[in-house]
Amino acid sequence: MKALTTLVLFTILIPAFSQTRITGKVTDVKGETIPGANVLIKDSYDGTSSGLDGTFSFVTEEQGLQTLIVTFVGYKQFTQQVELSGTVITITATLKEEINQLDGVVISAGSFTAGEEKRRTILKPVDIAMTAGATADIAGALNTLPGTQKVGESGRLFVRGGDGSEARTFIDGMVVLDAYGPAAPNTPSRGRFLPFMFKGTSFSTGGYSAEYGQALSSALVLTSKDKAEMNQTDIGILSVGADVAHTQVWDRASVSGKVQYTNIQPYFGLINQRVDWIKAPESFESSAAYRQQVGKSGMFKFFGNFNQSSFSLFNHDILNPTVKQKFDLTNRYRYGNASYQQALGTWTLRGGASYSYNQNDVRVSENPMGETETGIHTKLVAEHSVSDQFEIRMGSEIIHRDYKSARHNEVLGNSEELSFREMLSATFAEGEYYISNKVVAKAGGRFEYVSLNQSATLSPRLSLAYKPGKQGQFSFAYGSFTQSAQNQYLRFNTQLQPETAQHFILNYQVVTDRKTFRIEAYQKEYRNLVKFNTANPTIISNAGKGNARGIELFWRDSKTIKNVDYWLSYSFLDTRRLYLDYPIAATPTFASAHNFSAVYKHFISKWKSQLGFTYSFSSSRPYYNPNRPASQFHEDRTPAYHDLSANVAYLPKNNLIVYLSCTNLLGRDNIFGYQYSAATNAQGQYESRAVRQAANRFLFVGVFITLSKNKSVNQLPNL
């Protein structure tokens, strides 16, 4: 019996003792840290990437003499022989620039250089979760960055003069057809996906890679997490519901699942609302993620999401508020995403498929109407390092969409149905070349063919970067972008051509240790925008056009003040459009000329707390006043928007968090526009009603508990 026990103990303990931990730091020849460098054991899956301070650490079960490899674009490969024997090994990896000149252009996460990856603004999940006022919503946090603006009645991303439909979301390279949950009229919607699902959130405000299509203004690129590292159970008790999640980890795989129930009714019973709710929003959501390491360098990922939500309310007539109309909505949403990545020598292959299903069942005064959209997206991408100076990327994809809508015709007493089926085929290719240590260029293009209207478009992309000194660098980007017309217009005219936009961007940026300064100017030209006449909105064409120009400033500093991270952003926007039912070219109702945000985060170790404040300002927005002549279209202006929000996270124990968030702390009555009556009053005037927030403030309280063998683990990065 003793022998058997000893054998069992050896079986359990030997793998643990055979693991070797490899730690170290990646720097250049001048001692500057290099974040994002790839560190791995040759011919194995084991490895990691260096952090913002250049350090890395990972565990491997490989044994004996092995080769450690460190790579980063623009530098020579670093290799070192290491003896793996179950101990801790510390490595100092010094990378030499491939081109033998000092101060070369370095493409790194967070900078705005020639590469699409580097022109994005990078936010970690904890940045999004702990940005006051965002309430852990990805779009809410991104709205504090330059190029965006607050559109409080929508909650979506509005980028550089583009409306909310022009910013598209991609998960592991696959497009998400509807990334926002349903919302009541003139109330903000939230993103369907929580930030802690992703290891990084990349947001491009223009000039992005040819890999991403069907986005006129911006690409929100989300990369999901890899295999989890430990078993844990998370429980959340919220002021608006509850959730529970569990993660199970094996040697080369992990699975995570979460269920969440949300019911706003008890909260609305405490806080007065301007919306006449019959049934407050209620939803049930479940999600699952599976990660599997395949061989020595392959990774398979699957993510699935299920959501069902509903609400009902009364809309009141503007002329006679006692006259009301009942509005009911039930939304059913399904999303699945599977992807695989494999390294084959100097090539990397990745591909995936996604499925989307979104159904809105609507009843207006008990008359049924609604819409259903399903989509399948498949993609295959190949990346190849031709040399240390030249990399190429190429691929192809197919997006297939089915759309159906139906509404009850009160006059004819029957149901009217509209539908279309669209298949988009695309190929893309681009190359990135280090011309010298100071200049890098990236060029490519994207070809799309849409079977629905037999349209074919070729969209070129070009980026250049020049680094004259040790830190700052200039960047220029040009790109042509296309996007199919929105469903609400395409269903009436399936021959509508894709809308197009051309981006011209000039940027200067300085990135030092934990500090970033950026100034950027841009010009956008819109063509083939949807245009129709108010008298007959079913007659739709591509006669619309527009433009947008502006300048943006961004400053982030997490070094100067101890335990403090803050950023400041300012955007100036000048935009005009002649589209939809506009009689003349005018500034759209969602656009404000000046936008400013200040975000402050402070960790107080003595109190085991983290405090956050966000101040947002937007100048007045235009709106349509039918009491004015057409020559004064959109000349009226709303009051300016002001919002000061705050949050605090307190850790009474390492695995227990108490979280409190309050938006619009000062209770300002922000007005986003005005609605006008369909008919005139006795004096021959159209009466108006202000579009306001449902309540001046939104208060959120949550208690989050984590159960794990590692007692120091908590949900702070996930809030």
Image (spheres, rainbow, N blue to C red):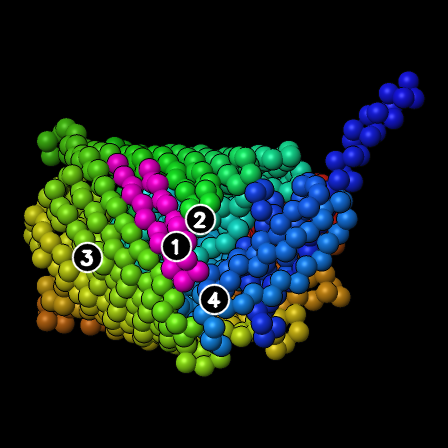
Name the residue nearer the viewer: 672 or 254: 254
Most extreme residue toward the top is 1
Which residue bears the numbered disc 4? 98
| Residue extent of the magenta highlight | 378-400
For the residues labelled 2 and 1, the Cα–Cα distance comes to 8 Å
Q: Position of residue 216 (x, y in %)?
A: 26, 57
State if disc 4 and disc 2 touch (CB < 8 Å).
no
Residue 687 in view here: no
Q: Nearer the viewer, mark 1 or mark 3?
A: 1
State if disc 1 and disc 2 touch (CB < 8 Å).
yes
Judge the density around disc 3: few (<14), some (14-19), many (≥20) Cα neighbours within 10 Å: many
Q: Position of residue 243 (x, y in %)?
A: 58, 39
For the residues labelled 3 and 4, the Cα–Cα distance comes to 39 Å
* Amino acid type at mark 2: Thr
Which residue bears the numbered disc 3? 500
Task: Check residue 174 for magenta coloring.
Answer: no
Which residue bears the numbered disc 1? 386
Q: Position of residue 100 (x, y in %)?
A: 47, 73
For the residues labelled 1 and 3, the Cα–Cα distance comes to 33 Å
* Amino acid type at mark 4: Glu
Q: Nearer the viewer, mark 3 or mark 2?
A: 2
Q: Determine which quarter of the picture holds residue 682.
A: bottom left
Q: Decide which of tag 3 and tag 4 comes sooner along the chain.
A: 4
